[in-house]
């Protein structure tokens, strides 16, 4: 089986981005147990199974569980489906309908703020304090560590640590955590996360618009 690999939320120079696995023919991997095994084998922070490309029906797994919503997989899936000739105007993960569009080379989705839960936001005084954190920091539970780079401009330095014991010590770029922070601060943000990734958000009250650059990182072949 060929799994397409993308980099989602690439940086301004095209570097960075969080690796994402895309199983275009999701129906070839039926059942949650089989999908969970494949996601664990691939070892990406998330893997997306496309169950109906025309309707945008997708299923998202981490190496250790299924997610009703996640930002970086949906931004990546929207870009991928458009590359394959589909409209991808609406994606349909388990959480609900997610509108999507592209503008100026950026792929955008709009999500309910209430879908981004279960992440602890921890502010630090300086970006250098965020950079100095070990991967992962001590403790348990999903941690989003952040600091202002330029508060008037809405520029943030962030790092994400799932701390769920499945081999993902640090998430290079994570949309749901960016949605959570945007909702908490009630303002548009530009987030520099991980080693070289960039996430853009727009605060819309009940909703948050989330976007970034996406690029292909090749194909990975696994045993079906």
Image (cartoon, grey):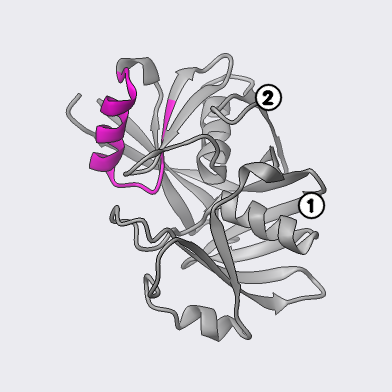
Q: Position of residue 89 (x, y in %)?
A: 68, 24
The image shows residue 59, relative to residue 199, as above or below, that is above
Magenta residues span 29-49
Q: Which residue is mark 2?
A: 89
Residue drawn at (48%, 54%) of the image: 17
The numbered mark, 2 or 1, whose residue comes first in the sequence reads 2
Q: For this view, does 200 lie left or right of residue 193?
A: right
Labelled pair 2, 1 in contact (Cβ < 8 Å): no
| Disc 2: CA contacts within 10 A as few (<14), some (14-19) or many (>=20) | some
Q: Position of residue 146 (x, y in %)?
A: 59, 72
| Disc 1: CA contacts within 10 A as few (<14), some (14-19) or many (>=20) | many
Q: Position of residue 153 (x, y in %)?
A: 79, 71
The image shows residue 215, relative to residue 160, as above or below, that is above
Give the Cα separation between the discs numbered 2 and 1: 20 Å
Q: Which residue is mark 1?
A: 203
Q: Quadrant of residue 46?
A: top left
If the image is split into quadrants, where does the N terminus sit?
top left
Q: For this view, does 173 lie left or right of residue 156?
A: left
Q: Does dot 2 land on a helix, a strand or a loop? A: loop
Q: Does dot 1 land on a helix, a strand or a loop? A: strand
Q: Position of residue 197 (x, y in %)?
A: 53, 61
Residue 158 seen in the figure: yes
Say which of marks 2 and 1 sits in front: 1
If the image is split into quadrants, where does the C terminus sit?
top left
Mark linked to residue 130: none
Residue drawn at (68%, 55%) of the image: 200
Residue 144 shown in magenta: no
> Camera-side residue: 166 or 131?
166
């Amino acid at each position: 089986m060929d799994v397409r690999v993308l980099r989602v939320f690439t940086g301004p120079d095209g570097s960075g981005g969080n690796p994402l696995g895309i199983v275009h023919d999701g129906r070839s991997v039926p059942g949650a147990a089989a999908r969970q095994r494949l996601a664990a084998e691939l070892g990406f922070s998330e893997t997306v199974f496309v169950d109906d490309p025309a309707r945008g029906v997708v299923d998202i797994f981490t190496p250790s569980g299924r997610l009703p919503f996640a930002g970086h997989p949906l931004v990546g899936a929207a870009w991928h489906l458009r590359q394959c000739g589909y409209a991808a105007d609406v994606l349909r993960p388990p959480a609900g309908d997610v509108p999507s569009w592209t503008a100026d080379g950026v792929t955008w989705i709009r999500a309910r703020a209430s879908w981004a839960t279960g992440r602890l936001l921890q502010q630090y005084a300086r970006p250098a304090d965020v950079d100095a954190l070990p991967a992962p920091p001590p403790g348990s539970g999903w941690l989003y560590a952040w600091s202002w780079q330029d508060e008037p401009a809405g520029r943030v330095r962030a790092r994400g640590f799932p701390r769920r014991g499945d081999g993902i010590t640090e998430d290079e770029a994570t949309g749901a955590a960016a949605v959570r922070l945007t909702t908490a601060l009630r303002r548009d943000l530009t987030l520099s996360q991980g080693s070289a990734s960039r996430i853009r958000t727009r605060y819309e009250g009940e909703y948050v618009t989330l976007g970034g650059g996406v690029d292909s990182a090749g194909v990975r072949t696994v045993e079906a």
